[in-house]
């Protein structure tokens, strides 16, 4: 969850401990993305270690992970096999963005116990923080999700003490009436983490975990978000797998937070939803510097972290300020535009999305922004790279059925000016065009697509662009 080291020299070793996968290199004008896939409880997760003269090697977890407990070396029976290490190469960034290698090399480890639903939802914590994990606020967010046409809310940390189990059952029943299911937050716990947030001690022991999941199934809980994992040692990889395997038996989907990169898990585990494993939206609330760098990071995530696996970023805020009531000059200030927020909902891929929207956005955000956020998909049939450079700007096209969403953002100080050629769009098609002016005020208009001309776009710094057919 550290920041990217953009345009660094080859041969470096990060801050002395190597690099977390995936790693993107620019080599001789082309691009090389290095990662791994197929990691389960039978091996540890690895990293990339830099040496002199541009040599890199695989590194196992560090001794201090898991609070110093557990072996850094994996143990496998013979015959056995290691995870896949993958190298994706492209003259442009298209093969990097469009690769399916992390999923092509692995197979499902078990049958889905039911047909799982990938959903959109809201969560109070990103705007309102710990003190608002309360029954009245969560009920308000159920109403908000229902108003948005979303299927879930995420009830974050401390619900066990600030709401209580009886009231969670009441919330689940209330949500069911509105067509809104609950995701519940859990601390992973065990010897590897000292985090005090509850509920604690329920995910690290199989018997206790299964009893908890049986209770969740009985009240209709849709999924869980498990947080604060201790490292990449094999014992932790086994915990990920055990949580997923048990959750599937009870029909529960799983999001991981404070965690490692997912390595082919979307295909390996049918009830896997998404993982954080990135400097995510909570940091926008915690500090202004993250808000100042939001566009830079977003233009990097698109080509690196999100290129190999689902990314639970939890973003697309429409509040101008990260505080409960969107009060000016209180808390960190969002520097990006509303069109940027909408574009990020397309650029960032996660099968289950809990967006950083707030109930006040129903009346203080532009109508066109709310309408778009109601309609944007979370699962896609196709992705195409159009333009971009990591940390500077990104323009992708994603397709859901017959509808295309072309989304772009700009992190450069100077405006981004391009003529977008869209071969997937038929000549003369009417496109809905979302754009920012130089003051980051958004507006929408309809245009006709002319293939000879393309679509001229001009995106200011921290701004975005969207086109839909």
Image: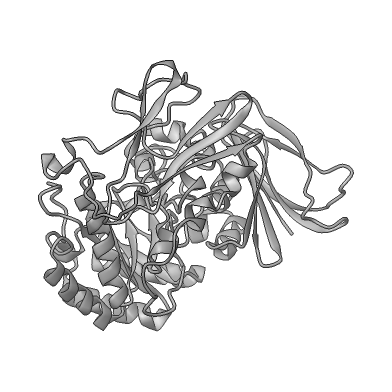
Tell me residue 77's x, y (percent). Answer: 23, 55
Residue most extreme to the top? 53
Quadrant position of the C terminus in the picture: bottom right
**What count of labels does the image hold?**
0
Check the image and report above or below for 97 versus 188: above
Q: Nearer the viewer, residue 280 or 239?
A: 239
Image quarter for residue 68?
A: top left
Does residue 14 appear in this view?
A: yes
Tell me residue 192's x, y (percent). Answer: 14, 47
Quadrant position of the N terminus in the picture: top left
User: What colour-coding does the image apply?
Assistant: one colour
355 horizontally vs 202: left or right: right
43 horizontally vs 194: left or right: right
Tell me residue 100's x, y (percent). Answer: 55, 53
**Which residue is painted at 23% across and 78% down in the image?**
169
Check the image and report above or below for 12 versus 448: above
Does residue 324 appear in this view?
A: no
Image quarter for residue 30?
A: top right
Tell me residue 426's x, y (percent). Answer: 83, 58
Q: Nearer the viewer, residue 407 or 192?
A: 192
């Amino acid at each position: 969850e550290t920041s990217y080291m953009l345009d660094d020299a080859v041969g470096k070793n990060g801050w002395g401990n190597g690099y977390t996968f995936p790693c993107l290199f620019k080599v001789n004008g082309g691009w090389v993305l290095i990662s791994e896939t197929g990691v389960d409880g039978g091996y540890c997760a690895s990293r990339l270690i830099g040496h002199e003269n541009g040599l890199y090697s695989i590194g196992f977890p560090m001794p201090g992970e898991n609070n110093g407990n557990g072996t850094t070396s994996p143990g496998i029976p013979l015959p056995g096999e290691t995870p896949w290490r993958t190298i994706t190469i492209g003259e442009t960034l298209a093969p990097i963005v469009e690769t399916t290698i992390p999923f092509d090399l692995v197979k499902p480890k078990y049958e889905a116990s039911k047909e799982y639903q990938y959903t959109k939802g809201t969560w109070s914590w990103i705007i309102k923080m710990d003190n608002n994990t309360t029954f009245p606020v969560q009920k308000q967010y159920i109403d908000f999700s229902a108003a948005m046409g979303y299927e879930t809310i995420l009830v974050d940390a401390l619900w066990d003490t600030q709401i209580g189990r009886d009231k969670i059952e009441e919330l689940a029943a209330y949500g069911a009436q509105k067509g809104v299911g609950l995701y519940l937050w859990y601390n992973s716990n065990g010897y590897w983490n000292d985090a005090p947030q509850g509920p604690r001690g329920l995910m690290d022991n199989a018997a206790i975990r299964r009893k908890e999941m049986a209770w969740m199934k009985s009240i209709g809980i849709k999924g869980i978000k498990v947080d604060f994992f201790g490292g990449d040692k094999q014992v932790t990889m086994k915990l990920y797998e055990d949580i997923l395997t048990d959750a599937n038996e009870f029909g529960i989907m799983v999001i991981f937070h404070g965690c490692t990169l997912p390595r082919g898990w979307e295909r390996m585990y049918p009830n896997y939803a998404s993982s954080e494993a990135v400097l995510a939206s909570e940091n926008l609330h915690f500090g202004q510097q993250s808000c100042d760098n939001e566009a830079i990071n977003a233009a990097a995530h698109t080509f690196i972290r999100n290129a190999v696996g689902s990314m639970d970023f939890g973003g697309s805020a429409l509040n101008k300020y990260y505080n409960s009531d969107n009060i000016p000059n209180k808390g960190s200030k969002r520097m990006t535009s509303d069109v940027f927020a909408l574009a990020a909902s397309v650029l960032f891929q996660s099968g289950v999305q809990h967006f950083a929207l707030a109930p006040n956005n129903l009346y203080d955000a532009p109508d066109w922004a709310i309408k778009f956020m109601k309609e944007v998909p979370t699962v896609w049939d196709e992705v195409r790279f159009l333009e971009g450079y990591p940390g500077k700007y990104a323009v992708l096209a994603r397709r859901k059925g017959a509808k295309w969403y072309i989304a772009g953002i700009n992190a450069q100080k100077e405006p981004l000016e391009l003529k977008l050629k869209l071969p997937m769009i038929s000549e003369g098609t009417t496109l809905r065009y979302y754009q920012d002016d130089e003051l980051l005020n958004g507006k929408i208009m309809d245009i006709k697509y002319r293939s000879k001309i393309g679509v001229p776009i001009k995106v200011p710094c921290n701004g975005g662009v969207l086109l839909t057919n």
